[in-house]
Image (cartoon, rainbow, N blue to C red):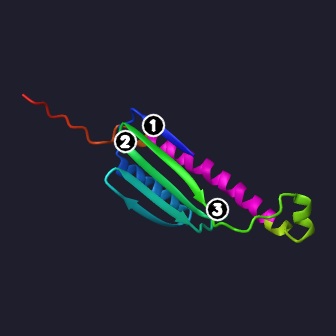
Amino acid sequence: MQRSWTNKNVNLETLIDTIGEFFKAKDFEAVKMQTEDRYKILAWDSTYYKFTGTVTLTLEGKPDNFIISLELSREKKRSLPSSIILTTMFGGGYFLMKQLKSDEEWIRFKRDLWAYIDAAIMNLTNTANVDTTEEI
């Protein structure tokens, strides 16, 4: 899932630090990486949101035109039979329920994170350094 913003003039370094605060407040293990034009946060193992997998948040672009993308990477596990009846009949009901709860937590996490990001962007609008020098 990704979202884009234009004409906000946001200091991207401050924004990624603010997003990092969200992960810290929600008790994630997280790592922040930065390249020339991209910021990335990898986060996992939250005690607040109980879903399985690693969250990858990527922020790229310029202060007035940037994109934030969010994805969840999960370990590849043996797939359960496609029939729910067969799954529950052979003891897979526990694993099916665990997966469904994890999916619910992922949805709750995304809702909370996007709301947090929207509020942060609103507070950080016009915070990017603008070159105000004019050539004579």
- Estimate the spatial distance between the alpha carbons at disc 3 and disc 1, rounded to whole Å: 27 Å
Q: How crowded is mark 3: few (under 14 residues within 10 Å), some or many (20 or more)?
A: some
Q: Within the magenta stretch, is there residue 115? A: yes
Q: In this view, does 121 lie above or below 134?
A: below
Q: Within the magenta stretch, is there residue 118? A: yes
Q: In this view, does 17 lie above or below 61?
A: below
- Estimate the spatial distance between the alpha carbons at disc 3 and disc 2, rounded to whole Å: 28 Å
Q: What residue is drawn where x is 39% and y is 35%?
A: 8
Q: What residue is drawn where x is 33% and y is 41%?
A: 127
* Near-viewer residue (11 or 73): 73
* Near-viewer residue (130 or 95): 95
Mark carried by residue 10: 2
Where disc 1 sits, the SS reads strand
* Disc 2 versus disc 1: nearer the observer: 1
Q: Which amino acid does label 3 sit on?
A: Tyr
* Near-viewer residue (56 or 24): 56
In the image, farthest residue toward the top: 136
- In the picture of the structure, the residue carrying the numbered disc 3 is 49
| Quadrant in the picture for residue 67 | top left
Q: In which quarter of the image is the C terminus?
A: top left
Q: Mark 3 or 2 closer to N-term?
A: 2
Q: What residue is drawn where x is 66% and y is 52%?
A: 108
Span of residues in magenta:
96-121
- Determine whether label 2 and label 1 are within 8 Å by CB: yes
Mark carried by residue 5: 1
Q: Mark 3 or 1 closer to N-term?
A: 1
Q: Main secondary structure of the magenta part?
A: helix
Q: How crowded is mark 1: few (under 14 residues within 10 Å), some or many (20 or more)?
A: some
- Estimate the spatial distance between the alpha carbons at disc 2 and disc 1, rounded to whole Å: 10 Å
